[in-house]
Image (cartoon, rainbow, N blue to C red):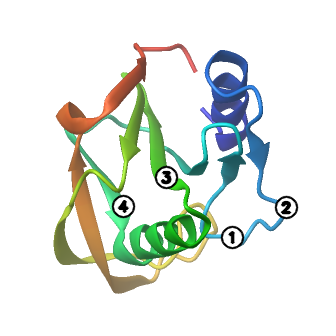
Amino acid sequence: MSELRLFEFLRLNFLPDLERSSNQFERFDCTSQSTKLHVELKCRRSHYPTLLIEKKKFDALIAASTQLQFSPCYINSTPQGIFGFNLSKVEPTWQTELMPATTDFGNTDKIEKVVGFLSVADSVHLSGAMDF
């Protein structure tokens, strides 16, 4: 699934006023004014019982959302469904991992990143397994 398809699914089924960020380098992908959500989208090719978020992304979402009095939301699609997290209600387990510098942009150099893991059990399950 692409982030565009995930965005369209969310807008059609849950958040009709969802709008994409005008800046592709924002620390969030979209916003819902009616529900006061800042949403970061992530599409995973594999399913894991815990889903990864970079600490930089987490901190930026929390800061931007707090400033505007919105809730920070992290939504992941995997082959087993779509899972949403209210980041103000979860605290990931943080650790430093050697990871690719970027995802899907051809730079496979490894760098250290502080990342957290969110248990799928702590998410809101927005859909079951889907054929993407």
| Amino acid type of the residue tagged 3 in the rendering | Ser
**Distance of mark 3 from mark 1, alpha carbons?**
16 Å
Query: Percent from the top left, x then y, of residue 124?
Result: 34, 28
In front: 88, or 111?
88
Q: Are marks 1 and 2 in contact (CB under 8 Å)?
A: yes
Of the numbered discs 4 and 2, the one sitting upstream in the chain is 2
Q: Earlier in the sequence, mark 4 or mark 1?
A: 1
Say which residue label 3 marks.
Answer: 71
Q: Say left or right for 57 vs 87.
A: right
Badge 2: few (under 14), some or many (20 or more) residues near its Cα, within 10 Å?
few
Q: Quadrant of residue 65?
A: bottom right
Residue picked out by circle 1: 26
Q: What is the quadrant of residue 96 in the picture?
A: bottom left
Q: Which mark is residue 115?
A: none
Question: Disc 3 or 2, which lies upstream in sequence?
Answer: 2
Give the amino acid at mark 2. Ser
Whole-Å distance between the Cαs marked 4 and 2? 22 Å
The residue where tag 4 is placed is 53
Q: Nearer the viewer, mark 3 or mark 4?
A: 3
Q: Residue at x 65, y 42 (%)?
A: 3
Q: CA distance from mark 3 to mark 4?
A: 16 Å
Which numbered disc, 3 or 2, marks the residue closer to the eye?
Answer: 3
Circle nearer the N terminus (3, 4):
4
Q: Nearer the viewer, mark 4 or mark 1?
A: 1
**Which mark lies nearer to you, 4 or 2?**
2
| Of pointers 3 and 1, the one earlier in the residue sequence | 1
Check contact, mark 3 vs mark 4: CB within 8 A: no
Q: Amino acid at mark 1?
A: Glu
Query: Height in image: 118 above or below 27?
Result: above
Residue 63 position in % (x across, y down) = 49, 75
